[in-house]
Amino acid sequence: MTAALASGDWDVVLTDFTPPQFNAPAAIAVVQASGHDIPSIIISGTIDEEQAVGSLRAGAHDFVTKKR
């Protein structure tokens, strides 16, 4: 993700909350460390209210829940 952020202009980062190897909190941290001002939006079917609020406080701009 670091290489991708450095190689182009991005409008938004969409990330799932719970993939096994690289989750939304990790993606948000990479975007913030890059110095880019890119909105990060979490898409998840498993995020609960506490996790969503924590993600917003950590720098996510919004979240969308998947309907099952």
Image (cartoon, helix red, strand yellow):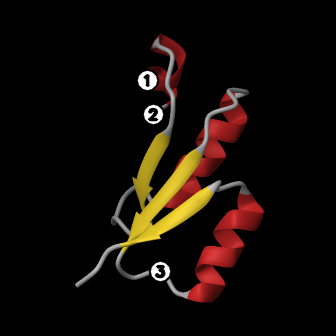
Residue occupying image coordinates x 62% and y 38% = 31
At x 57%, y 47%, the residue is 40
Judge left or right: residue 25 versus residue 37: left
Relative to 16, 54 lies left or right: right
Q: Earlier in the sequence, mark 3 or mark 1?
A: 1
Q: Is residue 35 above or below residue 66?
A: above
Q: Which mark is residue 4?
A: 1
Q: Eyeballing the image, is 62 above or below 46?
A: above
Q: On the image, numbered disc 3 is attached to which residue? A: 47
Question: In this view of the protein, which residue sits in the foreground, 66 or 21?
Answer: 66
At mark 1, the secondary structure is: helix
Q: CA distance from mark 3 to mark 2?
A: 22 Å
Q: Which residue is mark 2?
A: 1
| Location of residue 53 with respect to 4 vertically, above or below | below
Q: Amino acid at mark 2?
A: Met
Which of the pair 27/41 is nearer the observer?
41
The 10 Å Cα crowd at callout 2, few under 14, some 14 to 19, many 20 or more, is few
> Looking at the figure, which quarter contains the N terminus?
top left
